[in-house]
Amino acid sequence: MYLIEWFAWQEHIAGKRRAPLSGGKPMGGGKRLRKRLEEDEQRREELNAQRHNEAYLTGPVYACNDTYLEMRCGAFEHLRGMTTLISLVCVGFLSFYLYLTLLDTVLDPKDFDFWDIPFSIFTGCFSIGGFYLYFRYLFRFQLLESFTTRHLLIRFNRVTRQVYLHRPKCCGGVIVMPWEGIHHDFPGSSAPMEISWDRQDGEYGFPVTVAMVGRPVDRIEDHYALWEYIRRYMDEGGLQAVRPPLGFSMQGPWPWVAFMPQFEGLGLFFRGMSPLLWWLFVILFPAYMVLGLGHWISLLLCWKPRWPKEIREAGLPGKPAPKITMIDDYPPKIMEQLKANAYRWKAPPPEPEEMKLENTRIDKNTN
């Protein structure tokens, strides 16, 4: 489900500045969640203090050769299918009421009498009004996991020194970003690794772009290992510097592709789980299966993502590197909206005190 990417893109092209979802206040959580976040932060500081020597892949990998490394991108993959199930229930319920109306008025007119008139009017108006509200306000969210590309992709090309993001047009479309200047962050366990770009080159660079790479992991060390693998692949010689993947994930709408993400990142909760929670998981297991069924249906309603020709040929001998995506590459209407909102991602000028501290630091380094 491409909810985060959709919200981020809507924020970039919105007419008004939106308030944070949490109202600027830290979001609460249970004791166990806060304890886990504190442990992740402590472990992150320890790993930042020392160079992480392990390098391995943790997420679904679709291709890897001496030219590029392609992986799954995006968050909330384990929740994909929920919107599809809700849509199926809504459409099925409204279709049933519409069928009752047609049954009384058209399909079986002989048994139609005066008392059926108010019932038919009510069911007909209810069905038509329900379909209008669904397609007017809710169908847009269904398009975030159905009737669109089957997965979000990210491709690291070590020859052109570029990173390509494959997203639907409603989430920003396919863009080309530079490898230099990339930032990485580790949100913690049970979440994918986060990479971002904060570009400010020229008058109108590009909005802050964030991508979630791979799958949710059980340990914070897995984030560091994945980033180290990507860094070595891009900076130290491709497959000569890292271990090649043991296998590749499938992009087809196979059932196991839909059911496996439901259990990604749950290893942390399984470790040390009390017998009561184990029984709770057994009780909720059918719900996981139902969600996986919705995931599978959404995959069947999607198509395999396909890169533009210039990106497919990027890195081949004699082929030029794709142009880095800028705001001016978008249609005029979206370009105007992005330029009007440029103040949101441009860094404010430093305060005089900050400039003084920065100049002092530079002088010390120079001496």
Image (spheres, helix red, strand yellow):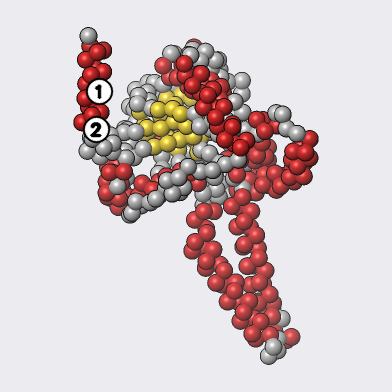
User: Mark 2 is on which residue type?
Assistant: Pro
Q: x, y percentage for residue 349?
A: 23, 35
Residue bearing mark 2: 350
The residue at the point 77 percent across, 38 percent down is: 276
Q: x, y percentage for residue 81?
A: 61, 48
User: Mark 1 is on which residue type?
Assistant: Glu
Q: The C terminus is located in which quarter?
A: top left
Residue 229, visible in the rendered structure = no
The residue at the point 61 percent across, 37 percent down is: 31
The residue at the point 43 percent across, 13 percent down is: 236
Residue bearing mark 1: 358
Is residue 135 depicted above or below 272 in this figure?
below
Residue 287, visible in the rendered structure = yes
199 sits left or right of 193 in the view: left
Mark closer to the chain start, 2 or 1: 2
In space, the residues marked 2 and 1 are separated at their CA atoms by 10 Å
Q: The N terminus is located in which quarter?
A: top right
Q: x, y percentage for residue 207?
A: 34, 40
Is residue 342 depicted above or below 59 in this figure?
below
* Corner quadrant of residue 175: top left
Secondary structure under the numbered disc 2 in the rendered image? loop
Category of crowding for the residue at label 2, using alpha-carbon neighbours closer than 10 angstroms: few (below 14), some (14–19), many (at least 20)? few
| Disc 2 to disc 1: CB gap under 8 Å | yes
71 sits left or right of 107 in the view: left
Is residue 249 depicted above or below 172 in this figure?
above
**How many discs appear?**
2
Category of crowding for the residue at label 1, using alpha-carbon neighbours closer than 10 angstroms: few (below 14), some (14–19), many (at least 20)? few
Secondary structure under the numbered disc 1 in the rendered image? helix
Q: Residue furthest bottom?
A: 114
What label does residue 7 carry, if any? none
- 128 or 254, nearer to the observer: 128
